[in-house]
Image (cartoon, coloured by chain):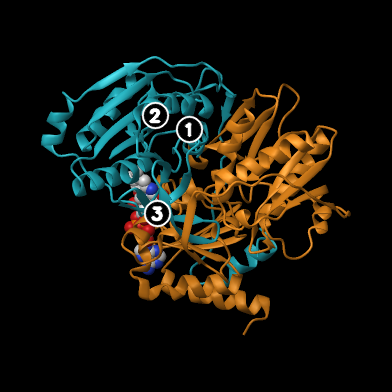
Amino acid sequence: MKILICISKTPDTTAKIGFADNNTKFATDGVQWIINPYDEWYALVRAIELKEADPSTTIHLINVGGADSEPIIRKALALGGDEAIRINSESSDSFFVASQIAQVAKEGNYDLIFTGKETIDYNGSSIGGMIAEILDLPFISHAIKLDIDSSNALIAREIEGGEETDKINLPLVVSCQKGMAEQRIPNMKGIMGARTKPLKVIEPSSTEEYTSIVSFDLPPAKAGVKLVSPENPEELVRLLNEEAKSI
Amino acid sequence: MSVLVFIDQAEGIIKKSSFEVASYAAQTAKILNTTAEAIVLGKVQGTLSSLGNFGISKVHTIEDANLNHFDAQVYAKVIADATEKSGAQVVVFSNNTTGKAIAPRLSVRLKAGLVSGAVALPDTSNNFVVKKSVFSGKAFAHVSIKTAIKIIALNPNAFNIVKEDGAAEIIPFSTTVPNSRIEVTATNKITGDVPLGEADIVVSGGRGLKGPENWNLVTDLAQALGAATACSRPVSDIHWRPHHEHVGQTGLAIAPNLYIAIGISGAIQHLAGVNRSKTIVVINKDPEAPFFKAADYGIVGDAFEVVPRITDAIKKLKGIS
Ligand SMILES: Cc1cc2nc3c(=O)[nH]c(=O)nc-3n(C[C@H](O)[C@H](O)[C@H](O)COP(=O)(O)OP(=O)(O)OC[C@H]3O[C@@H](n4cnc5c(N)ncnc54)[C@H](O)[C@@H]3O)c2cc1C
């Protein structure tokens, strides 16, 4: 089985969020970069588990990003990816990114294409569905469990107001979230091996973009907390009712 | 030309997030000097003409056995046909699990730019710019959509419903509906509870509650308030509470009117998913807990002593005994 995993570079979850160049760019000074947690903890680790169960499985990583994405690609290789492709572009448009990945996927005959449920920076949740539509494949979003039974995927997914289990013929596109797998730490052997695994860099196959970011801003700061004495918690209820009018 | 909104119905019941998107579509239509129409797929129970009260003038309905189970591929095809037929220029979804699955597919089908996670009406003063939540609620981006047709997926609880008087005209719509390639083998709906993403009030518990046996502190308060319940990530990781209650940067991002955090420290990753809440109340025994910096109201105290008294006071206020 061939699995393609889309991995994205995102700021560390503790990174300070600020903007530069007249609020048109994310301020990257001092920011640590990580693999988007959904891509790493759930998509990649589940693929590694499938490979452990069936060693003929190969894990292919794909990233649309600049050269500064390479450390996170190497980390994904250290965790258990077999080879990687980086499509050299910094675009933030979901359609552009999805088209590049779909172009590669068309030629690769992958049985499964995994994305995370969203990136923690752009929060788009769009790439998986777009790739599926471009390739005319089924798309299961918000997967929480996935098993393979010969040519079928058996998937539990979150739906609005509950859960559902599905059976779908491969190939397909899946977006992954909590439940699929548990976070792992790369070991020394993985880190050493990752240095020599293939990482191919290609140029984008098209330039079409549907959207562009004009500017960013930060939410207004809170006015400050109003403390209520623990001796008189009933006062909190009064404030919520009369002042905040929220109950 | 029109604005088309997808109305998601769970077992024939139209949900709050659908009224929000209906209202958002109607207000967008006003900006564009046009009308708002809705599309409802699958078997409908109850009346749809009441969507007129949210500013919708026409409702396109299509019933087909292939639409009774949700498949984003099939739904996107039908909605694309309806968009073309109604000449819609803007298509609106709720940015919930259903909308997140359909909108990207529709974007490709219609060659239409998508902004998901929208939090405000489009700004048409200079092109077509939509404000969306980014960095898991820590910031906003203003995104310009450059294509002829535009798709917007609106975050739940981000837009205030505007009510007006009116009745929508129901128009049956027909098109070919392909078979789904997904075989649904089981569904498990969580019924009775308020869905977390749409809840007005959320009561949330953290590791400070010491164990699942103490969760009645959270659930009793939630029940008195008619609230949904949530939890911090470690609480769901150690299986004190189910995964779907996990809120934060790597869980669900929510924006209720009132968020009450009990025994949660307020780590940056937790705040990311809840800081869009209108009013935040923090109950924590540690005065140095970072959550107090993000709170509107706080009590520095022991949750085991304070919370039951709050629950009682709320019951008294609401006349529940
Ligand atoms: C990449 C990454 C992603 C993450 N994503 C998320 C996420 O999405 N959501 C999330 O929640 N976390 C997330 N975390 C974890 C986060 O960093 C914190 O560890 C977590 O939120 C802490 O949970 P907590 O507040 O329940 O527990 P703790 O930090 O242990 O805090 C417990 C609090 O309870 C208080 N307390 C104890 N006893 C009482 C009492 N009797 N009465 C009142 N108060 C009491 C304590 O003072 C303390 O403040 C993430 C971490 C990482 C690294």
Residue kind at label 2, given as amino acid type: Ala
State the residue lying farthest toward the bottom: B321
Chain drawn orange in the picture:
B
Q: Secondary structure at mark 2?
A: helix
Q: Are marks 2 and 3 on the same chain?
A: yes
Where is mark 2, residue-wise? A105
Quarter containing ligand 1?
bottom left
For the point 72% across and 30% down, the residue is B123
Is disc 3 placed on a helix, strand or loop? Answer: strand
Q: Which residue is mark 3?
A: A155
| Letter of the chain that mark 1 sits on in the rendering | A
**Quick one: label 2, few (<14), some, or many (20+) residues within 10 Å?**
some
Dot 2 or dot 3: first in sequence order is 2
Q: Residue B26's x, y, as percent?
A: 79, 43
Q: Measuring from the top left, give residue A35's x and y in whole percent.
A: 33, 35
| Quarter location, residue B317 | bottom right
Residue A48: image location, x then y, percent? 24, 43
Q: Are marks 2 and 1 in contact (CB under 8 Å)?
A: yes
